[in-house]
Each structure stands twice: as C-alpha cells, then as structure tokens.
Image (cartoon, rainbow, N blue to C red):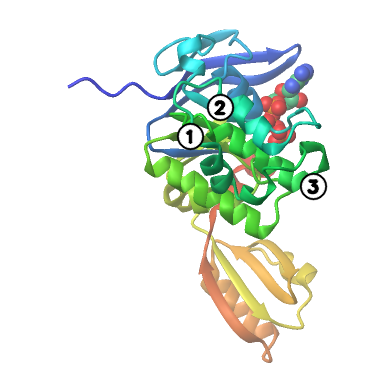
Amino acid sequence: MLAPIPAARLQGARYRHGAVCALDGLDLELHAGEVLALLGPNGAGKSTTVDLLLGLKTPDEGEARLFGADPRGVASRLQVGVMLQSAVLPERLTVRELIEWASCHYPHPMPVADAAALAGIGDLLAKRYGRLSGGQQRRVQFAIALCGQPRLLFLDEPTTGLDIGARAQVWAAVRSMAAQGCAVLLTTHYLEEAEALADRVVVLDRGRTLAAGTTAQVRALVGGRRIRCLTALPAEVVAGWPQVREAQVVGGRLEVVTGEAEAVVRCLLDADPALQELEVLRAGLAEAFVELTNPHAREAA
Ligand SMILES: Nc1ncnc2c1ncn2[C@@H]1O[C@H](COP(=O)(O)OP(=O)(O)OP(=O)(O)O)[C@@H](O)[C@H]1O
C-alpha cells in the first residue's frame, strides 16, 4: 500500500536571509490529524519554516510541499488555514463581516457562528475589530484561520497575549480540529502548550533540528528531574552545586533541575534540616528544551 501523502513536507530545505542562514537543510513532515509543535529559541527558524510551507518564500535548496503539491498553487491554499504572528485587518469591519469575508474564499466554510464559538468570540460578532482588545483580536484571527474547515492549520504563536481562559479555549479548538483529521503545525514559546497539545515536537536551533519525537521522547533525551521544596537555602548557593543544572525560587519555593536527583536531595537535607514539602518531579519539556538549546551543551556536543 502507498504511504499517505503528508499534509506538509520540507525536504532538505535551505533558506538564507542575506548573510544569515535561517534554515540549514531542514526535513519535516506533518500528517492528517497530527499536531506538530515547532519549538526553538528566538531566531531558530520557526517562522521561516512556516513561510516556506505557505509558499511565502521559496527554498534556496530542497523542497516544500503541501499535500504533495506546490504550496503556491490555489488547490493547496484552499485547504489551509493560517494564523501568523501578527495580522493587519480592517478596523471598521465587524467580527462577523471579517469571518464572512474570510469564509467566502473557501469551498466548504463552517457557519460563522461555529467558527466564532470555537474561538470563544460568539459574543463579539457585532463589534468592530478596531474596538477589540489585543487578546480578542487574536481570537478573531484564530476564527479566521479555522473558518474554512482547513485540512491543514498553521498557528504561529497563537496564544501569545491571551489570558488563561482564552488560551484554554484555543487549545480545545485545536484538539477538536485535530480530532476531525486536520493537521496542525504550531509554533510556540509556551512549552506547556506544546506539552498539552502536540503529538510530536521538533526542536529547532539555528535552522537545524536539534531533537524530534513525541514529547515523551524529547523529554527522555535529558532524563532530568525537578526538585521542589520550602527551604531557607539561597538559590544562588544551590545553583553552584556540581550536580545542579538550574536553581531558582518560584512562588516562594526553591526549584532545582538536576540529572542526579538522589544526590541533590541528600545535599539539600544535609544543608537544611528544617527543609519541608520536598517533591521530586520528572523532567518536563521545559527542562529538555533548556538543556537542548543551552549554548554550552551545544558547544560540547
Ligand atoms: N527579513 C529578514 N532579514 C534578515 N534576516 C532575517 C529576516 N527574517 C528572519 N531573519 C533571520 O533568520 C533567522 C530565523 O528567523 P525566524 O524568524 O525564522 O526565527 P523564529 O524561530 O521564528 O524566531 P522567533 O521565535 O523570534 O519568532 C534569524 O536569525 C533571523 O534573524
């Protein structure tokens, strides 16, 4: 049987912005029903990846394909919904008018009310776009990305600037779209967002893949633990211990990231017999990300 054609694919994609190599031979595949999170520090090449797949830029070398075809073709574009990092929309139009205008570009759009409900802006349809808060405008852009019932959704930092409730609404909508078979490419700096949504993550750095796999696989690459406790020990002191990768006070508690949890727990208890509420947690994507994109670790590798 033939393998299914990926919704989006980059093969050996290189792209230079003048002297800067933004993508250095990147391979990437995204399939129907899958949420792929593209992670990486500022300047890693995430937006350039999205631009190549959308046909907004053409790779200097290698290939970008949507549903096996040129991303610039009309057939590809009609199957894609996009939410870029910033968007300029006519401020005098109402939310309903904007969603209707976007919908009419697609062959099988969803009802305007459904797109608005998915984005959590059902009560804003009659408001002018220019009168909305930044977070509300962001959700209108999200509704516009989904309204065409796309088979592929690009979301470039979709929840930046959203409050907790709005973020949860966007997450629920992304899950619902993926459950219906839509492929979703998500770029984000919120690692908990990738952890909550993504089937797979790709960690980019300087235009290359540093790590790729399920969130569990990427997490396992570092095998660290997070220790949390109430203690009078200063974080700067603990940060200087040889087994400790990172130590800081978060919400009044000391948080330590380490690859040698048992040894650090012993040191903590020796150094502060009054220490309380000790917890040892498995490493999350945040620890993996810090480690993988840490310049010292990179250089050593
Ligand atoms: N128009 C441009 N002109 C010159 N260099 C650019 C341009 N756009 C991007 N770059 C460079 O290309 C590299 C990749 O940028 P890109 O915007 O793809 O990164 P990113 O991972 O999306 O970053 P961020 O997380 O900050 O959005 C960076 O070094 C950036 O400085």
**Which image quadrant shows ligand 1?**
top right
Q: Which residue is mark 1?
A: 110
Looking at marks 2 and 1 on the same chain, the residue that comes earlier in the sequence is marked by 2
Pick the residue in front: 260 or 81. 81
Per the image, label 3 sits on a secondary structure element best described as: loop
Q: Which residue is mark 3?
A: 133
Residue at the spot 64% in from the left edge and 59% down from the top edge: 165
Looking at marks 3 and 1 on the same chain, the residue that comes earlier in the sequence is marked by 1
Determine crowd level at label 1: few under 14, some 14-19, many 20+ residues with C-alpha closer than 10 A: some
Circle 2: residue type: Ser
Q: Which residue is mark 2?
A: 103
Circle 1: residue type: Met
Above-or-below relation of 177 to 279 = above
Circles 2 and 1, Cβ within 8 Å, touching? The answer is yes
* Image mark for residue 77: none
Pick the residue in front: 122 or 169. 122
Tell me the distance, in whole angstroms, between the alpha carbons under discs 3 and 1: 25 Å
Circle 3: residue type: Ser
